[in-house]
Amino acid sequence: MVRKEYVVDEVQKMMGNLKNVRNVAICAHVDHGKTTMTDSLVARAGLISKETAGEQRMMDFDEQEQARGITIKAANISLAFQMNGQDWLVNLIDTPGHVDFGGHVTRAMRAVDGVVLVVDSVEGVMPQTETVLRQALKEKAHPVIFINKIDRLINELQLNDEQMQQRLLKIIMQVNKLIEEYAPVEFRDEWHIDVKKGNIAFGSAFHKWAVSIKAMNKFNIKFSDIFNHCRQGQHNILQEKAPLDEVLLTMILEHLPNPLDAQKYRIPQIWHGDINSDDGKALLLCSAEGKTIGVCIGVVNDPHAGEVAIVRLFSGRVRKGDMLYMAARMASEKVQQVAIYMGPDRVMVDNVIAGNIVGIVGLRDVFVGETVSTGEVVPFEQIKHYSEPVITKSIEAKDSKDLTKLIMILRALGKEDPTLKVELNQETGEHLISGMGELHLEILIYKIEKEKGVPVTTSPPIVVYREIVTGKCELVEGKSPNKHTKIKFSIEPVEETVMAAMLEGKIPDGRPKGKQLVETLVEAGLPREEAKALMNIHNRSLLINDTRGVQYLNEIMELVIQGFEEALDKGPLCKEKVFGVKVKILDATIHEDPVHRGPAQIIPATKRPLYAGMLIAGVQLQEPKQKITILVPAQYMSAVITLINGRRGQMMDIQQEGESATLLAKVAVAEMFGFANDLRSATQGRAIWYQEYAGYEPLPRDLLLKTVKSIRERKGDKPEPPTPNDFLD
């Protein structure tokens, strides 16, 4: 086979032949070998030496990634190959596997048309494997599978070749079960994983060999050969016979779609404009001649160039000097540089056409998920993150002169990573950063101190609770401070089916736009009259105008919405966010003179009755939970169960296979601090454990008052929770 060392201008030429372009993400559970596997493809493209591939972990170029041995952020690279006498281009994204960085995976799925799912042969399908595959299928990204670390089955578990085949079949069945459940109906059969189809390979990424049914026929290798070579440690023979890069590349090029084919079925899923319009046709055809339309899937802060937007282009092309419109900001910016990513390096190019991934310098204040285009277009669907921030720390600059710099850094980090939430507590003046877990915040603080050079002090981690309404308040009346305006509300929980649709991301927060949302709400179970009268959605709560012919209501509606949002952002019980409340405006008496109905009058006339109404209806706290998977030798099982029970945990499943056991439990985030050390002690360091976000659940009643009091004291309020009378005049 002829091997070429491709330079960037040749990569750019290849971008034009879209039939031979593949946009692919490598995804898996943490430590299953994604980055090690990616090295072989990078070496094949001539960017690193084949000898160091597997150990170099080129895509983990961040200092913290190298130090911790895990991928923290998604890394992009455009790789050029020659195969079967043709030139091919693979735009590759290596994604993180740790649950705290799952947001990077979600964003990468919008950019790619196919994924290589890596599964550890010993651990099998783990929680994060399931999560990343589900995200890929939701974005209609076509999966192929690589089962890694086959040598562990032989050397560690001492399996014979028949037991090995049984183990691999079990993994294939687990993956197929997920595809059956989550894949788009029209692709279930086609995307089904089957050895005969050749859309599954297995091997050892570290030892750089792999086989698929096609490779076994082509290289004349039998299963027994693999078994014998592995048993004798002859990985070099397998590497010569069936190199990993060759087998993987063949599978990617043959089974994953090019942008021309993929966009035909992906665009209707992620873009809700008119498919028959000029823009719609250009997107479906992935036309380089159409209007430039793309989605920002990442923001990188470059010390020299400023913000670099990483964009998947779905139609048109981007050149230096183009004016691009950003949908959320409703502003245009000039493109200063166009680049492609080669791992850690950003390389300038003249232009990039649709169907590829591009770095754009010059788009100020661009956000992840932003639609960028020449002129206005219907924006793409929001990128929906599955997990939510569950841990908060307050952060302050040690030196007050660094305060402005810290604010700038936090703003920049918030753009790079939308799963990080940054808030300013107006009362105390401190900044609050909320993230997916302890590791997420630990790495952010490291970046601020070591990379940006701002020493900070942080509080111990605080759990993010939520307030919900459990009953109904038929009528509550609020009066403005000057008593000239009265507004009547009713308060109740949002219907469970509507809440489920919001959690799935079908109903976004914000002001309702278009008739489509009304139909989605009705479909989810909201009465049609209420869906038509919807004024605002905030924190998955609804504000509905159920009045008839009230004078001046339109003129104060903006202030009512503002009061509604403020009430939900700081609930009545302990100033935590309120979720899942349906508020109806029933009636209003409004003063005719605008002077008497400004913000100082209308916002209190909205907030105070909402607080009183929620307390009358009954307010409960919800706490975040995490699902924990623990792999442990069977002899330590009872010690782990005792540990889980001692932390208000709930055992969900226990499976024992030989000498090892897998325990599945659900534990409140509040009880997870210090868990790693306790688990290490209880199992003498023999346990491997993973966690994933498992949503919010009501706090047990016996803990409610104690928790409310401690949150109120922390926020500087008197410990006793308020009563409805505190808010009614």
Image (cartoon, rainbow, N blue to C red):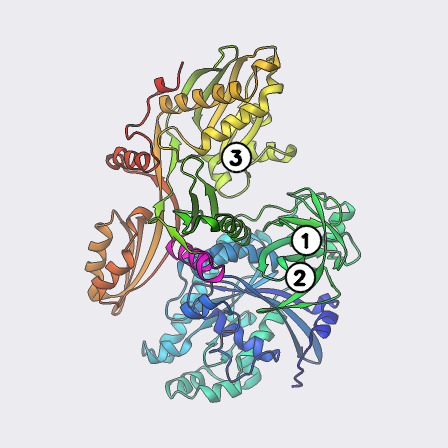
Mark 2 residue type: Val
Please identify the quarter of the rendering in which residue 319 is found.
bottom right
Q: Residues within 10 Å of mark 3 (few under 14, many from 20)?
A: some
Is 358 placed above or below 11 here?
above
Give residue 172's position: percent from left, percent from top: 45, 66
> Relative to the observer, which residue lies in front, 671 or 634?
671
Expressed as whole percent of the image width and height from the top left, the position of residue 714 reads 32, 38
User: Is 598 situated left or right of 494 in this image?
Assistant: right
Q: What's the amino acid at mark 1?
A: Gly
Q: Nearer the viewer, mark 2 or mark 1?
A: 2
Residue 362 higher or lower than 84, as above or below: above
* Residue 139 is at least partly visible in this image: yes
* Mark earlier in primary sequence (3, 1): 1
Q: Which residues are magenta?
A: 435-454
Q: Secondary structure at mark 3?
A: helix
Q: CA distance from mark 2 to mark 1?
A: 10 Å
The residue to which callout 2 is attached is 358
Question: Residue shown at 37%/77% (left/top)?
Answer: 152
Q: Residues within 10 Å of mark 1 (few under 14, many from 20)?
A: many
**Number of the front mark, 3 or 1:** 1
User: Circle 1 sits in a helix, a strand or a loop, which is it?
Assistant: strand
Q: Earlier in the sequence, mark 2 or mark 3?
A: 2
Q: Which residue is mark 3?
A: 524
